Amino acid sequence: MKIGLDKAADRLRESGSLFLEMFQHGSLSVELYKPDKVDRQQPHSRDEIYVVARGSGRFFHDGAWMDFTAGDVLFVPAGNEHYFQDFTDDFTTWVFFYGPEGGETSTDSKD
């Protein structure tokens, strides 16, 4: 299975949506997300990982801001407030939702 960024971006653009599911298997859902000027997302019910495909900007999570750029990986536990801001026009990110509603718990987290 392979998902190419350019082809996925074309599908997203054709859909007219800001995000589009590209793959699903078990609890895993892979989406491509490209907000338009303002990121209006709300906390999600499952854990998620962002892999920034294009662009750069600032990311708010856990009460703090951090800069991001293409290639960065960002983790957000289920239910946590988060959003992107001051991002470039080409900003596009893969989003991986996984696990149960409410998120996973772990006693051996590696930060």
Image (cartoon, grey):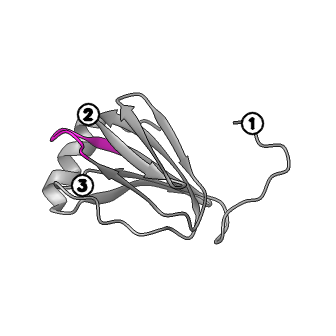
Which residue is depicted at the point 50% across and 68% down? 44
Indicate the amino acid at tag 2: Gly
Q: Earlier in the sequence, mark 1 or mark 3?
A: 3
Q: Quadrant of the C terminus?
A: top right
Tell me, yes or no, whether the highlighted magenta stretch contains residue 5. no
Pick the front one: 99 or 80: 80
Q: Which residue is mark 3?
A: 35
Tell me, yes or no, whether the highlighted magenta stretch contains residue 89. yes
Q: Which residues are magenta?
A: 86-93
Label 1: how many Cα within 10 Å (few below 14, some 14–19, many 20+): few
**In the shown orientation, is residue 54 left or right of residue 67?**
left
| Disc 2, SS | loop
Q: Which residue is mark 2?
A: 55
Asked whether the residues under the numbered discs 2 and 1 touch, taking CB atoms below 8 Å apart as contact, a structural biologist would say no
Residue 87's disc number: none
Q: x, y (%) of residue 80?
A: 55, 63
Q: Which residue is mark 1?
A: 110
Measure the C-alpha gap from mark 2 to mark 1: 27 Å
**In the shown orientation, is residue 1 left or right of residue 83?**
right
- As drawn, 67 above or below 79: above
Q: Earlier in the sequence, mark 2 or mark 3?
A: 3
